[in-house]
Image: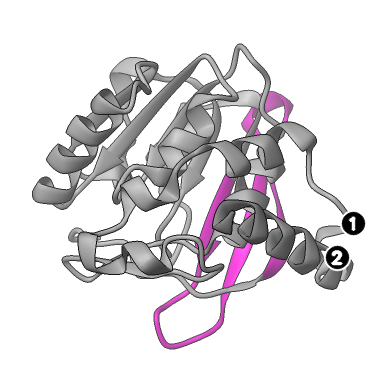
Amino acid sequence: MARQQMVGEIKDNVRATRFYLDKTALDEKVMRMMATVPRHEFVPEDAKRFAYDNRPLSIGYGQTISQPYIVAIMTDLLDLQPNSRVLELGTGSGYQAAILSGLVKEVYTIEIVEPLGLAAKKRLARLGYDNVSVKVGDGYYGWEEQAPFDAIIVTAAASHIPPPLKQQLKVGGRMIIPVGTMFLTQQLLLVTKEDKGKLVSKQILPVRFVPVTGGH
């Protein structure tokens, strides 16, 4: 029961970082998805034996599948509802999208690395995550045709919050994004959009993500 052990480690990590998170436990619905989604389906063949380790793993093309603890807290911070429509930047192998799939109405996810995006699209369809739409493209510009979104999750570090994402977030919506550069401390930011489009950012904790790619 490696998956259950992974869930236990996430709970331990949350308690250990309660000072940053301002809570000692995550939403039970989020933890249920962490216990349900088969992470081994989202890692390369040669990494399957490490699939339930609480750490990031390489998925090729210089990209990674995020540490389960980070996936869990980012998902929890979005405060998702069953009717939410979510945009994800950085599909990777599709694991984060699969976690979101069981919590919301629709997931729209964008991957700039074409082989990863196409493989994730096939994988998510094969595993039955049929409320997830995958697009190959530059997530910096969001997905204007499907906007606005109740929540936006960015799974690569940016030097700033992309302006198109600010516009595509609904009033009352939440965005979770790592901001910083590859060689300096990155901060996981929770961004909320208030009335009149005002954005309020809150630093959650220091993180380390691969950088956003594309010419920005």
Amino acid type assigned to the residue bearing label 2 in the image = Arg
The picture places residue 42, in percent across and down from the top left corner, at 33, 49
Assign a secondary structure to mark 1.
loop
In this orientation, which residue lies closer to the viewer: 174 or 44?
44
Please tell me how many numbered marks the rendered image carries: 2
At 72% across and 25% down in the image, what residue appears? 195
At 56% across and 58% down in the image, what residue appears? 2
Amino acid type assigned to the residue bearing label 1 in the image = Thr
At 16% across and 41% down in the image, what residue appears? 119
In this orientation, which residue lies closer to the viewer: 81 or 101?
101
| Quarter occupied by the N terminus | bottom right
Q: Residue furthest left?
A: 115
- Asked whether residue 179 is drawn in magenta, I would say yes
**Residue linked to disc 2:** 15
The picture places residue 53, in percent across and down from the top left corner, at 51, 68
CB contact under 8 Å: marks 2 and 1:
yes
- Span highlighted in magenta in the image: 176-205
Q: Is residue 159 above or below residue 41?
A: below
Residue 193 visible within the image: no
- Asked whether residue 36 is drawn in magenta, I would say no
User: To which quarter of the image does residue 133 belong?
Assistant: top left
Disc 2 residue crowd, few under 14, some 14–19, many 20+, Cα 10 Å? some
The picture places residue 28, in percent across and down from the top left corner, at 78, 36
User: To which quarter of the image does residue 109 belong?
Assistant: top left
Q: Which mark is residue 24?
A: 1
In this orientation, which residue lies closer to the viewer: 194 or 40?
40
Assign a secondary structure to mark 2.
helix
Q: Is residue 34 left or right of residue 16?
A: left
Q: What distance separates the C-alpha of mark 2 from that of mark 1?
A: 5 Å
